[in-house]
Image (cartoon, helix red, strand yellow):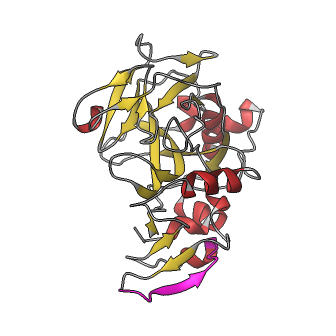
Amino acid sequence: MRSIVKAVGALGALVALIPQNTAVAAEDPEAAAQQLAERYSPVVRMQQEAPRCDDGEQFRPTDVEAVLGNQQVALRGPWRPPDLVKTQPKGNDVGRGYPGHALDFPGDPLRPGCDYADWSKEINREHPATVYAHVAADPKFPDKLSLEYWFFYIFNDYNNTHEGDWESIRLVFDVPTPQQALTTDPEAVGYSQHGGAERARWGDTKLELADGTHPVVYPAAGSHANKFGQRLYLGRGSEGLGCDDTTRPGTALRPIVRYVPMQQADYLKEYPWLAFEGR
């Protein structure tokens, strides 16, 4: 079946190499954005893994490079089988666009069994947990800046099981540049939850911080909807779609931050898979 490895927003780049010279950051927006990415990098409290693959949490934020070039992955077209375009597609392959296409992972999402859980463990042995960081602006809101962190999971093991799952959190600043954002606190934080999100103001009691700047995120078991705390969430829409469980958090996880340059030409050069137009 087909994954939904979709390049949401502007993701991708090399591991962040954060300049320590604040004078450089003051002159260089990119250097300042990299400093922001490290300063506010999230702490992730995944749910504890259970002995059974249909219980607890079996997945973690994954480096996209773990699936690209993998011999068990295929690029398929938007047609009826046989629709194979290429096996072991790499970043440059999917970076050619391919609208309507999809990456196909090993397993059947309608009957997942333990296939995806086992494959996730296999590919993550050589790839540490990863989060992608990107600073974005919107001309409609010229005095605001968004610092985005994107998490990629190879499988959504929830009500609507599917291959590929992107989640995110956003920190919003009431300033127009990364340099200015380094001199102030965020105004608000948003956590993705299914088709919506939940918001907290910086300093709200429900927002847990590690070391004063790192938002603590509680992904719900299987769905990976990002929550602010430990509880059983019953509801509809962005608040649960039935039952989101964050009651059994494991050890705090600090994913590697891979910084995504702000300009499209720069991030496509470093991570060409971001040009993928498939599902």
Residue sitting at 56 percent across and 43 percent down?
A: 58
**In the displayed structure image, the side of residue 248 where residue 200 appears, left or right:** left
What residue is drawn where x is 60% and y is 32%? 41
**Residue 16 image position (x, y, % from top left):** 71, 45
Residue at image coords 45%, 19%:
230
The outermost residue toward the bottom is 82
Q: Which residue is nearer to you in this view: 120 or 67? A: 120
Query: From the image, which quarter does the C terminus lie in?
Result: bottom left
Q: Is residue 133 left or right of residue 21?
A: left
Q: Which residues are magenta?
A: 80-91
One can see residue 174 in this view: no
**Residue 85 within the magenta-colored segment of the rendering:** yes
Percent coordinates x, y for residue 169 in the rendering = 46, 37
Q: Is residue 139 visible?
A: yes
Quadrant of the drawing holding the N terminus: bottom left
262 relative to 167 in the view: left or right: right
Taking depth in this image into account, of 77 and 71 the one nearest to the observer is: 71
**Relative to 71, residue 144 above or below:** above
Residue extending farthest to the top is: 205
Q: Position of residue 153 (x, y in %)?
A: 53, 50
Within the magenta stretch, is there residue 61? no
Could you tell me which residue is drawn at 64 percent across and 16 percent down?
211
* Count of labels in the image: 0
| Depicted 208 relative to depicted 42: above or below | above
Horizontal and vertical percent for residue 236? 22, 35
